[in-house]
Image: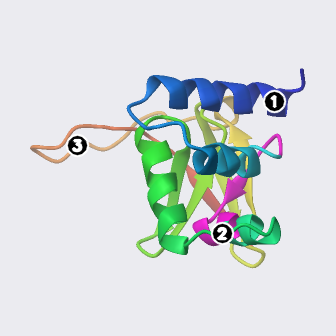
Amino acid sequence: MNMTNDFLKEAINKLKYSKLKITQQRIELLNIMFAGAENHFTPEDVHRKVKETGRSISLATVYNSLKQFTQHGILKEIRLSPDKMYFDTNLKHHHHFYDKYSGAITDVNSDKVKIQKIPEIPKGKILESVEVLINIK
C-alpha cells in the first residue's frame, strides 16, 4: 500500500472512532483531501475539486467538515492570517515554508528547525503548540 493510501486509511479510522457519523459525503471529502502524499489546501480548493467530480456541495459544508476533521485530529489547520487558512493532511510535527507569491506551502521537517527558547506564556494561557511558518517570496 502506498503512503497516500496509508494516510487515507488512518483518516478513515480516526473518523470511525470520532463522534462524527461516517457519511458518503465525508468519505468523498477525505478521498479528495488525501489524494496526494503531501497535501495543503484551502476550503475553496476542496470545494472546487468536489464540483469537478460533478457532485454538489456548499462551501459552508466544506468549511464545517474541515473544522470538524481538525477538531477530531484528522487534519491540521495552518492559519496564515485571520482570513486565510490552509489545512494539512500531514499530522506529524513539522513546520512550513509559505511562498507569498505563489501561495504554495511546503513541509519542513521539525529536525531542520531548532527552537532554543520561547517567551514566557501570558498569564492564564497554556502552550498548545509551537509551529514555525517561514515566509518566502
Mark 2: amino acid: His
Mark 1: amino acid: Asn
User: What distance separates the C-alpha of mark 1 from that of mark 2?
Assistant: 21 Å
At label 3, counting other C-alpha atoms closer than 10 Å, the crowd grade (few under 14, some 14-19, many 20 or more) is few
Q: Quadrant of the N terminus?
A: top right
Q: Which mark is residue 5?
A: 1
Is residue 57 on the magenta stretch? no
Mark 3: amino acid: Ile
User: What distance separates the C-alpha of mark 1 from that of mark 3?
Assistant: 39 Å
Q: Secondary structure at mark 2?
A: helix
Instruction: From the image, state whether disc 1 or disc 3 is nearer to you.
Output: 1
Residue lying at the far left of the rendered structure: 124
Q: At which x and y percent is residue 45? A: 69, 68
Q: Quadrant of the C terminus?
A: bottom right
Pointer 3 with pointer 2, Cβ within 8 A? no
Disc 3: which residue: 121
Q: Secondary structure at mark 1?
A: helix
Disc 2: which residue: 47
Q: Which mark is residue 49?
A: none
Q: Please report whichever mark, 1 or 3, sits nearer to the chain's N-terminal start.
A: 1
Q: At which x and y percent is residue 22? A: 53, 36
Pointer 1 with pointer 2, Cβ within 8 A? no
Q: Is residue 111 above or below residue 67?
A: above
Say which quarter of the image contains residue 9: top right
Q: Is residue 70 above or below residue 50?
A: above
Q: Residue at x 65, y 25 (%)?
A: 10
Q: Is residue 24 left or right of 66 when viewed as pictured?
A: right
Q: Please report whichever mark, 1 or 2, sits nearer to the chain's N-terminal start.
A: 1
Q: Which residues are magenta?
A: 36-46
Q: Is residue 64 left or right of 74 when viewed as pictured?
A: left
Q: Residue at x 76, y 66 (%)?
A: 49
Pointer 1 with pointer 3, Cβ within 8 A? no
